[in-house]
Structures are given as C-alpha cells and as structure tokens.
Image: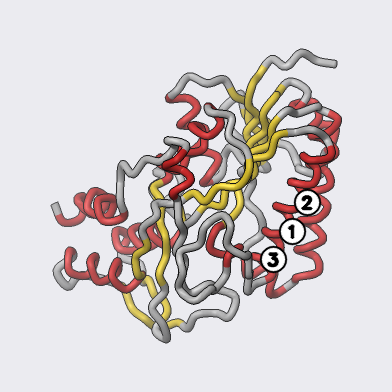
Amino acid sequence: MKEKTTSICLLGATGFLGSAIAKELDDRKIDWVGISRDESEDPRIKKVDLTDKDALLDVFRCSSIVINALGSAKPKDYEENPTDTLNNLWQNAISLSESLKLGKVAKLIHISSAGTVYGEQNDIRHTEKSTVNPISWYGKAKVIEELYLEKHCQINDCDYLCLRVSNPYGNKKKTTHGFIDVLINSVLSGNKFSFYEDCNPVRDFIYAEDMAFSIVELIKVNATGLFNLGSGESHSLKSITDYIIKKMKGEHFITRESNKPDYDVLVNKICVDKLYQYRAKRNSMDVYQYIDIALNEKIG
C-alpha cells in the first residue's frame, strides 16, 4: 500500500466551494491534492470522474483526509428527471464509498446543504438536532447522501464530519454562483435580474472565505458529527435588492417577475452555536459589506 504522503484530498477542487477551501488551505500552508470533473492548470488537481474507482483509489491511498465538496445536480434536474439524477447520485455515492474503504481513508468531511435539508419548518432557527423535512427531491437526495456516507464511516471505522452549509457568496473565481454574486454580477454588467414576486424569501448567507475558515478549523480540532455552517444571520432577498437599488440611485435592472417554484425553500434560518463552541466561527464579511465593496467600481 502507498504511504500516506498528502494529508488532504479535496474533491471538487475547482468548484465554488472547493476553490474557496483550496485557498484557505494554501493560506495556511496545508498540503493538499485535488480531484475535479474539469481540467485545471493547477498540477495538484487531477481530472477524475467519480465513477472511476481506480483513479479515485490511487489518490485516496495517499491521503488520510477526504473533503467532499463536489457539486451535485441542480434542484431543477431532480424535478425534471428524478430517476436518472437520483441513480447518478447513488452510483457516485457507491463509488466514493468503495474507494474510501479500499484507500483506508481515516476521515471524511462531507459538505451538504442546510436550507434544502431542513425544509420549511415554521420559520424556526434550525439546530443540528432539528428534524429534517426536505420539500424537494434535491433536498431528499442530500439527506440520502448524508446518511449513506455516515453509514459507510460507521462500518469502516472512518471519522465522519458532515457540514450543512447555508448560502455561500464571495468567491471571486466563481461570480456566477448563488443569489448574491449573480445579482451583483448582473447589476455590474447591466443584465436583467428578476426574482420572486409572489413571496419574500429569507436566506442565511455566509462569506465563502469564512465558510472555508470554519471547515479548516473543524479539521484542525478533529471535530466529528454534524455541524450547521452559516453566518447565523438571515436576510430577506427583498431587503438586499432594495439596498442595491438605493445604492445605485435608481439605476438598476432588478425586477420581481418570477414565481417561487414549489421545490424552493422559502425561509432558511440556522443556528450556528455549535461552531462557536468549537471556536470555528468567523464573520469577517457580511452581505452588505460585500455588496458595498463589489459595487464600488460602479458607483465610486
């Protein structure tokens, strides 16, 4: 068996979550290798399909910790083609599990989704002990994936850390991901941006660098189990768009023309007290600070 030469393998290293985590690891001078579905100029990142067990195993044999930051199919994919999308999720989970086992990985950090997993639950602030109640196939698939990988870790004596992340923003390499960055990018480029006119969604948002900080801190203290990962503060989408409209002094492209799809959670509020208990919480940039900085080029 190969010697464990690299401590961390980062799955999805070129994606929105993965690239933010990679930056944090680099900032702390922590050695890592990456796996991605896409090509990368970074020699540490290999292009590997998740179903390629041999290629996965080759990397896992050299890594003691695996961070699963792979992006899954979009919520709309599950609604339009649930059978094929769920089958693909299931096959990927099996391949990942078998490769983790054969590679004798000591710890798996799995990144899940807070809002979609908890679902709509009377506007309460969800804790890690809250009952999950997903309203979409996307959310149900996230729960299935969490439980499958948790069971794998229990059977194979592998530490398991599951992180339910809220809505990250602020990864400068990925400005077309998520409500905040898509909104800002649309305003700066003069493109139209519309959101739900039939309701007022509320979201917990977390700055991507703060998210990555929490993840690496939890690895540092060898945390296991389940954690909510967000800012702990929720904002209405209307208040955010109204702020931008005011800041742009009437020059805006924001409208409320679309209706909320049935599979989208309206209110996302999570409790992050457990992060504070582990001293893994940081709020270095809130939504409005980020908006101010991002729009400064336009109005400054």
Q: Is residue 17 above or below residue 140?
A: above
Residue at image coords 29%, 66%: 240
Please report contact status of discs 1 and 2: CB closer than 8 Å, yes or no. Answer: yes
Disc number at residue 148? Answer: 2
Name the residue type under label 1.
Answer: Ile
Horizontal and vertical percent position of residue 97: 81, 41
Horizontal side of 162 relative to 25 (left or right) equals right
Up-down relation of residue 119 to residue 232 (above or below): below
| Numbered disc 1: secondary structure | helix
**Where residue 279 sits: x, y (%)?**
42, 35
| Residue 194 in the image: above or below residue 234 | below
Cα distance in 3D space between marks 2 and 3:
12 Å
Q: In percent of the image, x 42 and y 86: which residue is there?
A: 198
Q: Secondary structure at mark 3?
A: helix
**Residue that label 1 marks:** 144
Give the left or right position of residue 91, taking residue 17 as reference. right
Residues at badges 1 and 3 in contact (C-beta under 8 Å)?
yes
Q: For the N terminus, which image quadrant?
A: top right
Q: x, y percentage for residue 225?
A: 63, 43
* Disc 1 from disc 3: Cα separation: 6 Å
Locate residue 155: give its quadrant. Answer: top right
The one nearer the camera, 143 or 123, is 123
What is the spatial separation of the Cα atoms under label 1 and label 2, in whole angstroms?
Answer: 6 Å
Three-letter amino acid code at the position of disc 3: Lys
Q: Tag on residue 140?
A: 3
Name the residue rendered at 33%, 59% in the picture.
184
